[in-house]
Amino acid sequence: MDLENQKRVKEFTEEYGAENIVILLGAAEGESAGLAAETVTAGDPTFAGPLAGVQLGLRVYHICEPEVKAEVDPGVYEEQISMMEMVLDIDSIVDEMKSIRDQYCKF
């Protein structure tokens, strides 16, 4: 997650409260999604950005997770996301997101 996005997440969390924030990711690999998820839950693991050492504990999901997919209009999902599902390792992404939530999410 780039430094500007870290800054935005931190500012929104300060303004609206962590309990009111959900982060939705769309990374193409489980590892990169996991790194971004860890950043908004446990803090920037590279210690380079605004979230270095900041444990927000935010809820974080990937757009391809079943519980998120169920909340999206099926037509929009089909048009915008379904093609990517064919090339992504969804199981790996879901496992990574669940692991991060189980370890770090407070809400």
Image (spheres, rainbow, N blue to C red):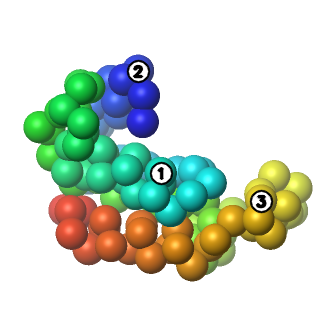
**At numbered mark 3, what does the secondary structure look like: helix, strand or loop?**
helix
Residue 6, given in percent of the width and then of the height, sits at 34, 30
Picture quadrant of residue 75: bottom right
> How far apart are the two marked residues, 3 and 1, measured between alpha carbons?
16 Å
Label 3 with label 1: CB-CB less than 8 Å: no
Residue 67, given in percent of the width and then of the height, sits at 55, 75
- The answer to which of marks 1 and 2 sits earlier in the sequence is 2
Picture quadrant of residue 47: top left
- Horizontally, residue 12 falls left or right of residue 105, namely right
The tally of labels here is 3
**At numbered mark 1, what does the secondary structure look like: helix, strand or loop?**
helix
Report whether residue 91 is seen.
yes
- The answer to which of marks 3 and 1 sits earlier in the sequence is 1
Residue 87 sits above or below residue 37 on the image: below
Q: Label 2 belongs to which residue?
A: 4
**Which circle marks residue 12 in the picture?**
none
Q: Amino acid at mark 3?
A: Met
Label 2 with label 3: CB-CB less than 8 Å: no
Outermost residue to the left: 53
**At numbered mark 2, what does the secondary structure look like: helix, strand or loop?**
helix
Q: Nearer the viewer, mark 3 or mark 1?
A: 1
Question: Which residue sits at x=62%, y=54%?
Answer: 28
Q: Label 1 belongs to which residue?
A: 32
- Callout 1: few (<14), some (14-19), or many (20+) C-alpha neighbours within 10 Å? some
Report whether residue 24 is seen.
no
Question: Which residue sits at x=23%, y=43%?
Answer: 45
Q: Amino acid at mark 1?
A: Ser
Q: Amino acid at mark 2?
A: Glu
Q: Label 3 belongs to which residue?
A: 84
